[in-house]
Structures are given as C-alpha cells and as structure tokens.
Amino acid sequence: MKTRKIEAVLSPRDPHMVGDGFRVHNFIPSMYPLSRERMSPFIMLDYNSKFYFPPTNQPRGVDVHPHRGFETVTIAYKGSVAHHDSAGNSGVIKEGDVQWMTAASGILHKEYHEKEFSAKGGFFQMVQLWVNLPAKDKMSAPKYQEITNENIKRVTLDNQDGEVEIIAGNYNGMNGAASTFTPINLLNVSLKKDGKANFSFPENYNTALLVIEGTIIVNDSRKVAGDHFVLFENEGEDFQIEAIEDAKVLVLSGEPINEPVVSHGPFVMNTREEINQAFEDFYAGKFGKL
C-alpha cells in the first residue's frame, strides 16, 4: 500500500490555563492547519504536557460547566482527575485510565484534581480530546464510559518492541473498549528504544499523532521530539513509527463527518440557530443540576 506522508510537524504553543488545574497547549483548532473541518471528527485537542503541581488542600480544576453536541475524551498519563456530571456519573481517572463522556443533548460536569493527588502534589500529564457527533446524534441522550487501564485491550508488537493500547477502533484485528458514533481509532503506543510499530488507516481518515514521551522517527525519515504533533496527508494508508528512545505516542485517526460545524464556547452544533437554542436550554435548566 502507498505510504501516508507527513503534512506538518507542529511544536506546542505557549500554554494557557483551563480553570486552575489544567495547563494546556492547544493544537486543535488553534494551530494552522488543524481546523475543525480539517481534523473532523476531532474538533479540539488540549495537551497538558508533564507539569508539576505543588501540594494543596483545595483541589485545582474546572468548576461546573455545560456541553452539548459532542464527546469529551480525557486520557490520563500522570496524575488523577475526579469527575461529576448532571447525569449522575462520577469517578476518578487515574494514570493509564480514559474517561469518555458523551455530552450529546446536554450535560453539566466538573473536573478537578483528585483529592489525594492534590494533597501530595506531583506531575500531571493529560490529553483532552473533543470528538464531534453527526447531526443525527447530537441530541441523543448523554452517556459516560469509564475505561480503566486494566480494561483496555492491548496488542504486543513483534520482537517485544512494545505494545499498542486500543482505546477505540481496531488494531491488528483487535477492537478497543470505547463505543463510538462514527469510525474512530484512538491508540496509545508504547515503544522501547529502537522499537517499531506499523499502522494503516483508510486514506480519507484524518490521521495524526502526538508524541507524549521520548523521540520518534516517522516513516524512516522524519525525527519528531516529545510534545510535538504530526499531521498526515490524506493520501496513502500506511505509516511507521520508530522510537529513538523509550517513547509513548497517541495515534488518532477518524472518518470525517463532513457536516457544518458551528461552535460557541462549550457548544458545538451545525447551525447558529442550534447554538442559540443550546444557550436557551442551558439557562432554562434543561441540562440538569449539579
């Protein structure tokens, strides 16, 4: 099959705070060419690169806020986050866990550093990804998938080069734990030094990777350092990554939804009228209570 070439390698932007608990570099949609349309179905990616938070008795985080029209996916690499929402879901996302929340028709939630982590302090490293929903599913019922690390399916690579954790989608015939509304592959790849992993996705799928730890070589040609984002072209299907040192890489690939995207703050819909309705419903208390 034809090799999928790199379109762009992007350095992390200056970080900004989300609430007082998440120090993030935004890649999608603020960095060119990572618009919501170009990256569909992935409409936002915030990366909290490894950062030390000192101990505190007041857990840092983001207070109650609404969402409608999409899903939030939080992947914990270091540290732990507690979550509560207006649908009655709550839990703690620990290192290696994933939280997949479908806001859909509307939900209130809050997320903050877990109490024990806050009291001790420590390194914190997370990815939050927003996944768009097609118009027919935007007003479906909210739901919550708590994907603990022990429930994530794994594929061991040849020659003990490392392993691939399948959060969603498929790798080498094995399906991931998360259910999705549109075809999505979301993989955590751990490679030992000199380890290699091969990937193949339909060429129309928007495909990218984020280097979480270490340094890698893509397609035997391009060196990419930690905390950098790689966008692939939409020609060809196959690509390879190789670790120069022990590395962890988040790989994402999804079928574009190809519908209008109209967003305002915490709402992502298809029309301005739907955004206005979201605000009306929120102020009317239709997202529940928390």
Image: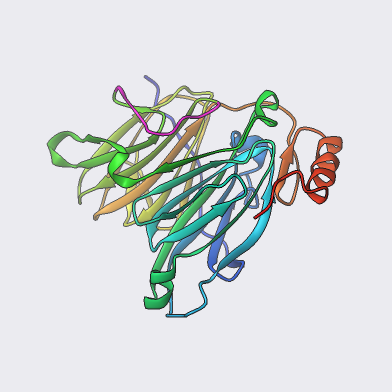
Q: Is residue 63 above or below residue 144?
A: below
Please identify the quarter of the rendering in which residue 174 is found. Answer: top left
Point 48% across, 53% down: residue: 127
Q: Residue furthest left?
A: 159
**Rendered location of residue 256, percent (x, y):** 59, 27
Main SS of the magenta part reads loop
Is 76 colored magenta in this rendering?
no
**In this rendering, does residue 225 appear at all?**
no
Q: How is the image coloured?
A: rainbow
Where 83 sits versus 287, above or below?
below
Question: The N terminus appears in which quarter of the rendering?
Answer: top left
Left or right: residue 127 versus residue 104 is: left
**Coordinates of residue 156 in the picture (x, y in percent):** 20, 36
Q: Quadrant of residue 160?
A: top left
From the top left corner, tell me how far across and down residue 197 is, in percent: 27, 37
| 23 sits to left or right of 108 | left
- Quarter of the image for the C terminus: give it: bottom right
Of the pair 218 and 78, the residue shown nearer to us: 78
Number of marks in picture? 0
- Picture quadrant where residue 140 is located: top right
Q: Which residues are magenta?
A: 173-181
Judged from this view, the residue extending furthest toward the top is 1
**Residue 135 can be seen, yes or no:** yes
* Residue 103 rendering spot, x and y as whole percentages: 62, 41
For this rendering, which residue is in front, 27 or 187? 187
Say which residue appears at 46% left-offset and 30% top-offset. 179
